[in-house]
Amino acid sequence: QSALTQPASVSGSPGQSITISCTGSSSDVGGSNLVSWYQHHPDKAPQLMIYDGNKRPSGVSNRFSGSNSGNTASLTISGLQAEDEADYYCCSYSGSGAPNWVFGGGTKLTVL
Amino acid sequence: QVQLQESGPGLVKPSETLSLTCTVSGDSINSYYWSWIRQPPGRGLEWIGYMSYSGSTNYNSSLKSRVSMSTDTARNHFSLRLTSVTAADTAVYYCAKIAARSFDVWGRGTLVIVSS
């Protein structure tokens, strides 16, 4: 299981939109639409922001959206706010054989 | 609302066994599937393994020879064992609840340092 590829960092100004990419292969990201995204503030528990590629859990702002094209999944955050500054991780589920998951390396979002 | 709390030794000697427990509150452990995930210092998240309420397990292939997970229904908790640890196993260890093929509830994490 190789880690999914994410940019190390992205940045944007308040009010802008940013997109974080997550590239895998046909055996993970490209094989299904079962990518989830997590927001992780230092010293806090990670929080699920997107599941099944584009679904938001209850309570997550609609400023967060997910999409998938081929072997690349994307997380878009619109109307950037200071509290969005955090690390973001993608994660792909594979149900072929026994269930297993692989994470991306993480992306540090800086709100300028 | 399900809540998770990790517990266990914060310091483990090299070559020994790391043992952690995740206590589940707010619901029965038999209602869901569970995972352990870790984050080494300065690095990203790594999935360790999964356990179903029926006891089925699957582990990250890179750790499979050293890891095991188990449940204690009476105490409503599940556990992680990682044998023959090295400094590379130093990390914050999280337990998480699985829903819709994702991790929807996480514990706050516990730091385990492997050092003599």
Image: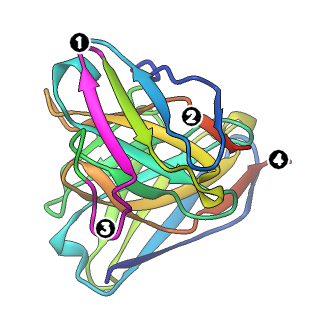
Magenta range is A56-71
* Alpha carbon distance from label 4 to label 3: 28 Å
Lower sequence index among marks 4 and 3: 3
- Name the residue type under label 1: Ser
* Distance in Å between CA atoms under marks 2 and 1: 20 Å
Same subunit, labels 2 and 1: the answer reads: yes
Q: Residue at x 64, y 51 (%)?
A: A85
Give the number of callouts.
4
Task: Check the residue under mark 1 and report the chain it is in.
Answer: A
Does label 2 or label 1 sit earlier along the sequence?
A: 1
Q: How far across and down, in percent of the image, does residue A42 sit?
A: 69, 57
Residue position for label 4: B115
Residue bearing mark 2 = A106
- Proximity of marks 2 and 4: CB atoms separated by less than 8 Å: no
Q: Residue at x 63, y 63 (%)?
A: B110
Circles 4 and 3 on the same chain: yes
Instruction: Using the image, name the chain to which the residue with label 4 belongs.
Output: B
A40 with respect to A5 (left or right): right
